[in-house]
Image (cartoon, rainbow, N blue to C red):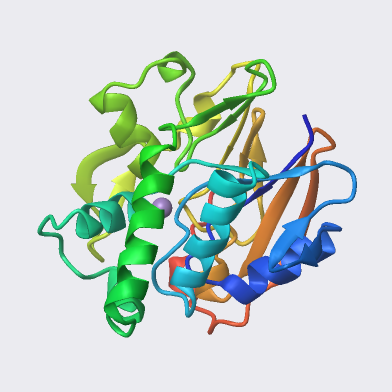
Amino acid sequence: MKIDIIGDIHGCYQEMAELTAKLGYRWDNGIPIHPENRILGFVGDLTDRGPQSLKVIELVWQLVMQRKLACYTPGNHCNKLYRYFLGNKVQISHGLETTVAEYKALNKDEQQSIRRKFIELYENAPLYLVLDQQRLIIAHAGIRQDFIGRTDAKVKTFVLYGDITGEKHPDGSPVRRDWAIHYHGKACIVYGHTPVKEPRIINNTYNIDTGAVFGGKLTALRYPEMEIFSVPSTMPYVEEKFKHFV
Ligand SMILES: [Mn+2]
């Protein structure tokens, strides 16, 4: 299987379009198509904070549900937006406010259309993707080796939020353990969720969330070649959002 896996987009549609062009996809009728049968993969967190979240949903829905040219697994922001669209009471914060503002600016028919598409995309997505005869796993915040194959609540929390301890840093952000340094599995794990300045590659795990929405870059991993492609972000740079590993 030949797949180009794209990190957390968070509404950065323009960067995503540029990145697919850099990867050799040709935009035909508003859809990126690779001349050599490659597909796209999305690690989740399509929306929130960035300028064009709904356009990203529309495109990923078309690629995954209509054209079967991509695979997608949800992130924590996707999960929250899904609950919002179901009518659940969720806090409109941490970037969801931008997606909701875009949504509210639409007319009723457009609202219904994007809401249905996102619900369909989300409900058809696995908690994490197991691809290429289990040699490749795509999980939003990563996955522990012993969780692979499981889909219970504990695993759901892990793949959406990472290895959280329940504690918080002084700035209110959750404390996350560094699961990747303990990973020794054979499968390659591609994930995002924690913005890093450069892709973090350790023990066959690839964090490709290079903070596009915080002014970093949008990154793709070309599999199985394991080549990295990035485009710079147009968003203002927010240094404190990037995690530095020692
Ligand atoms: Mn996330």
In the shown orientation, is residue 34 left or right of residue 174? right
Please name whichever residue, 5 or 67, is drawn nearer the observer in this view of the structure.
Answer: 67
In the shown orientation, is residue 186 left or right of residue 241? right
The residue sitting at 64% across, 76% down in the picture is 14
Residue 235 in picture, x, y percent from top left: 55, 82
Q: Is residue 42 among what the camera can see? A: no
The residue sitting at 47% across, 52% down in the picture is 194
Please name whichever residue, 148 or 32, is drawn nearer the observer in this view of the structure.
Answer: 32
Q: Is residue 84 among what the camera can see? A: yes
Which residue ends up furthest to the right in the rendered image?
36
Which picture quadrant has residue 87?
A: bottom left
The residue sitting at 21% across, 59% down in the picture is 84
The residue sitting at 39% across, 64% down in the picture is 114
Q: Does 3 sit above or below residue 154?
A: below
Residue 184 in picture, x, y percent from top left: 59, 18
Numbered circles on residues, count: 0
Residue 195 in picture, x, y percent from top left: 51, 58
The quarter of the picture where the N terminus appears is: top right
Which picture quadrant has residue 201?
A: top right
In the shown orientation, is residue 9 left or right of residue 114? right
Which picture quadrant has residue 41?
A: top right
Which residue ends up furthest to the front in the rendered image?
109
Which residue ends up furthest to the left in the rendered image?
89
Q: Does 102 sit above or below residue 62?
A: below
In the shown orientation, is residue 243 left or right of residue 115? right
